[in-house]
Image: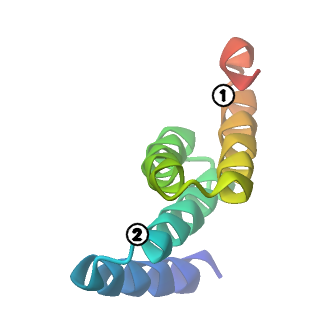
Amino acid sequence: NYSTAASYFDQALSRAIKENDARTLAYAYTGLGLIKHKKEQYYEALAYFTRAEVLWKDQNDIRSLIQTYQDFHDSFLALKQYSKAD
């Protein structure tokens, strides 16, 4: 259920902003991006992935950054922007 999941991610996002918790922010942005991707709202998904990317880089979290790049790839493929998917 995407709306329920989005609600939980929004709650996590609100708490993470208050607590200045960059890791939780990045996970919430990733989750919201994945929901947007599944709902075929690819540009909105890319915006969330971009926010997550910045946070993962700041934390030097390579594993999560790799996953985010895969998420970018999937969204660019869905948009038929093949050169950006590479």
Q: Is residue 72 above or below residue 20?
A: above
In terms of depth relative to the viewer, which is nearer, 14 or 76?
14
Q: Amino acid at mark 2?
A: Ala
Q: Residue at (50%, 59%) from the top-left corner?
A: 59
Q: Residue at (58%, 68%) from the top-left corner?
A: 31
Q: Quadrant of the N terminus?
A: bottom right
Q: Position of residue 46 (x, y in %)?
A: 52, 41
Label 2 neighbour load within 10 Å: few <14, some 14-19, many 20+: some
Name the secondary structure under disc 2: helix
Residue 79 is marked as 1
**Count of picture labels:** 2
Q: Is residue 86 left or right of residue 61?
A: right
Label 1 neighbour load within 10 Å: few <14, some 14-19, many 20+: some
Residue 20 is marked as none
Residue 22 is marked as 2
Q: Position of residue 77 (x, y in %)?
A: 75, 29
Q: Is residue 14 above or below residue 80?
A: below
Q: Amino acid at mark 1?
A: Leu
